[in-house]
Image (cartoon, rainbow, N blue to C red):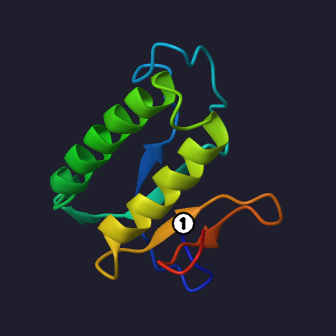
Amino acid sequence: MVSTTFEVAAYRTLWFGLQYDSETVEQVETVGNGALATVRWYDGEPVGDGHLQGQFAALKHVVGDMIDKGVFTPSTARQYLKRKLAERVGDRQELLIPTGESPFEKASLNHP
């Protein structure tokens, strides 16, 4: 993203789609179904977010299993992903999650 003062912020896309992590989820939205987390860039490459990517992949795998076992509905799974991702990111990075009212909202640990 580029601000009105031309400051550039790079973001990593974290997609909430679970059809590859769940045997029962067949198709999910591809637009507006995820989050953006800031990432540092060095010499044209993203750096320092490999740990978050690994944690997010593991989180999606567990959530997919919980859907298959009937613990989560797709809606509760999405809320759980949002909450746990906000906990993992904390204050280290900015996390933006799309909402129905506005394109994105800044996630916080106190937001569902």
Q: Is residue 63 visible?
A: yes
Q: Residue furthest bottom?
A: 5
- The amino acid type, in three-letter code, at marker 1 is Leu
Compared across the picture, whether 54 is left or right of 16 comes to: left
Q: Quadrant of the C terminus?
A: bottom right
53 and 46: which is toward the camera: 53
In the image: residue 88, left or right of residue 10? left
x then y, percent, for residue 79: 58, 54
**Residue at left 50%, top 20%?**
19
Percent x, y for residue 73? 62, 35
The foreground one among 38 and 14 is 14
In the rendered image, residue 30, in percent from the top left (x then y), is placed at 62, 32
Up-down: is 82 above or below 8? above
* Residue at numbered disc 1: 96
Q: What residue lies at 50% left-to-right and 78% top-to-bottom?
A: 108
| Nearer the observer, 21 or 54 | 21
Q: Position of residue 8 (x, y in %)?
A: 44, 72
Q: Tell me: residue 60, above or below residue 101.
A: above
Total marks placed: 1
Q: Residue at x 22, y 57 (%)?
A: 49
Q: Secondary structure at mark 1?
A: strand
Q: Which residue shows up at 54% across the image and 71% down it?
A: 2
Quadrant for residue 22, please give it: top left
Outermost residue toward the right in this view: 101
Position of 103 relative to 69 (above/below): below
Residue count near mark 1 (Cα–Cα under 10 Å), binned few <14, some 14–19, many ≥20: many
Residue 41 image-quadrant placement: bottom left
Is residue 10 visible in the rendered structure shown here? no
